[in-house]
Image (cartoon, rainbow, N blue to C red):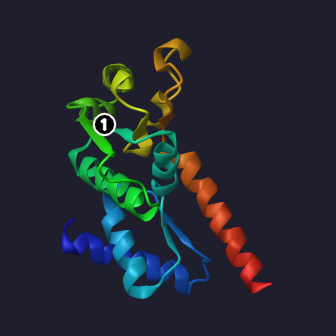
Amino acid sequence: MPQATADRLERHVAAALEAGADAVLVTCSSMGGVVDELRARHGWPVLRVDEAMVDVALAAGPRIGVIATLGSTLRPTADLVRRRARELGRDETELQVLTRLVDGAFAALKAGDAEAHDAAVRGALREMLPKVDAIVLAQASMARVAGTLEPDEAGGTPILASPRLGVERAVEQLGRLDELTH
């Protein structure tokens, strides 16, 4: 992550907290490492949108698939899976993180071809499903594809996206903050 981008995020988070926000939810998975650093350095109530998704995936088993359409999100998400496994006391020798970059899918989406994007992501899902206990989609832009496979194709393997789970985690954290202050 370029330092200028990390510095800009830090200024945005600081401004939100100074303006009275109880917490800040960062929705860009690529910025996850910066979020972790800000939380550690300042003790700020800043949350990653993808952390809850990874926790749900780890509860499904030790073989986690990570699918991304941007290279900048693939590694941070895979690193988050490994870190959360350690923090949750999982046996690292059993953890398997399989990654897949869906080349060209994000470019198709930016060009307005959502169908080509979705078809490419579905292909990657079908390829990875038999190999893992859960799949995490590294970008919020992929969330709409998560439920588009036929139930028998997924075979009960969770395909997880961050938006809903991240917001639910934020609400949970805000509830805890509220309990502590009242």
Q: Quadrant of residue 29?
A: bottom left
In the figure, 158 relative to 120: above or below?
A: below
Q: Looking at this view, is 66 or 22 the one in front?
A: 66
Expressed as whole percent of the image width and height from the top left, the position of residue 103 reads 20, 32
Percent x, y of residue 169:
60, 58
Left or right: 96 with respect to 54?
Answer: left
Q: Amino acid at mark 1?
A: Lys
- Name the secondary structure under disc 1: helix
Q: With respect to residue 120, does 97 lie above or below? A: below
Question: Left or right of 12: which side holds 170?
Answer: right
Which residue is drawn at the image coordinates 30% and 36% (left, top)?
110
Q: Quadrant of residue 128?
A: top left
In the displayed structure, would residue 111 be above or below residue 14?
above
**Dividing the image into 4 quarters, which one contains the C terminus?**
bottom right
Q: Residues within 10 Å of mark 1 (few under 14, many from 20)?
A: few
Can you name the residue that lies furthest to the right here? 182
Q: Quadrant of residue 116?
A: top left
Q: Residue shown at 46%/46% (left/top)?
A: 58
Percent of width and height locating residue 33: 31, 66
Q: How many marks?
A: 1
- Horizontal relation, residue 66 to residue 12: left or right: left
Residue located beneath label 1 in the image? 110
77 to 103, vertically: above or below = below
Q: Position of residue 178 (x, y in %)?
A: 74, 77
User: Residue placed at 32% from the left, 53% from the top?
Assistant: 92
- Give whichever of 77, 112 is nearer the camera: 77
Q: Quarter of the image containing the N terminus?
A: bottom left
